Amino acid sequence: MSVTREGARGRRAARTGTGRVRIAAGLAMIAVSWPLYWTTVGPFLLVLFCVLWTGYVLCVDGVVHRRTGRSALDRSPLGFAALFLLSSGFWWLYELFNLATHNWAYVVPDQPGPALFRLEKTLCFATVLPALVETADLLRSLRPARPEPADDRTVPRPVLAAVAVLGALCAGAVLVRPHDAYMLMWFVVFLVLDPLNARAGGRSLLVQIRRGHWGEFAVWSLAGLGCGFLWEMWNSGTAAQWIYDTPGVNGAPHLFRMPLPGFAGYLPFAWSAYAVVEAAARVLRLPLPAPGAPADR
């Protein structure tokens, strides 16, 4: 019995030590990059944004590791790294939408050449999914552990097909009437992918909601709003400017540089991130950290 207790204490000590190292490293990256991001100007300014968010990801991972012993990095180191690559492609999709909607523009002083600038933006985009996954993990670790009641209900196939078609129609509307339908771009990925995930037997927010399980929906919604707040806050004090044009709400009160109604876009954006992580893990067979409880499909 004493050997078992000593082993448990050893595991807790190791977990605490590993978590502390990650938290310390993350906080150090934030402490160095945040002031520099707000006070310096140069061709590599956006690299500081990437370092800042990588520090956030590492710090939160350390907190989750200490709380649960099963952070995203613990669950799959290879998948954790793959998240950064997947994230770049995920956000570049919205950059393509923005070619039609012109909802935001980057004004970066002392901007490097076009190729280097695209590379720096790609590095910044690489932190989006890891930040959302880690924030969702943190929020999930704060919830009281309550087993969901068994429920095998699913969403009827015709409804799933209709939702996916609706997503495709939203994409078409954004391209045809970008000035009026720009907000729909944030729903496209979720509406198309989540039904496909459900149809393939993967994790699906639609199926979870159908079963009355709102936990993951709430967690990812809050993760989107939380990360959105930090994105806007950290971008508000830097020489690099994110200029927004959101027809219909440009005159609304702003928080940082974003009109307050614009923060609503972070909700479907986070749901889309959930669907992308699940689809990539299933279709590409990537060992990605699971976006939710494995039992709730």
Image (tube, rainbow, N blue to C red):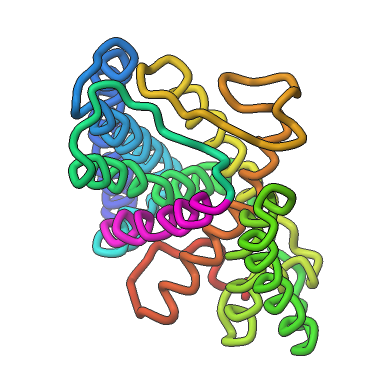
Verify whether residue 99 appears in magenta: yes
Q: Position of residue 68 (x, y in %)?
A: 44, 48
Q: Is residue 198 above or below residue 214?
A: below
Query: Residue at the location (41% across, 33% down)?
Result: 106
Q: Nearer the viewer, residue 105 or 269?
A: 105
- Most common SS among magenta residues: helix
Q: Nearer the viewer, residue 131 or 115?
A: 115
Quarter-of-image position of residue 102? top right
Q: Is residue 5 above or below residue 197?
A: above
Q: Position of residue 234 (x, y in %)?
A: 44, 23
Q: Position of residue 4 (x, y in %)?
A: 31, 55
Quarter-of-image position of residue 169? bottom right
Q: Work out which quarter of the rendered image holds the N terminus and state it.
A: bottom left
Quarter-of-image position of residue 283? bottom left
Q: Work out which quarter of the rendered image holds the C terminus and state it.
A: bottom right
Query: Residue at the location (20% across, 21% down)?
Result: 42
- Residue lying furthest top: 39
Magenta residues?
Answer: 81-100
> Does 187 sit left or right of 31 as displayed?
right
Query: Residue at the location (58% across, 49% down)?
Result: 101
Q: Nearer the viewer, residue 19 or 89?
A: 89
Q: How many marks?
A: 0
Verify whether residue 246 appears in magenta: no
Q: Is residue 193 above or below residue 130?
A: below
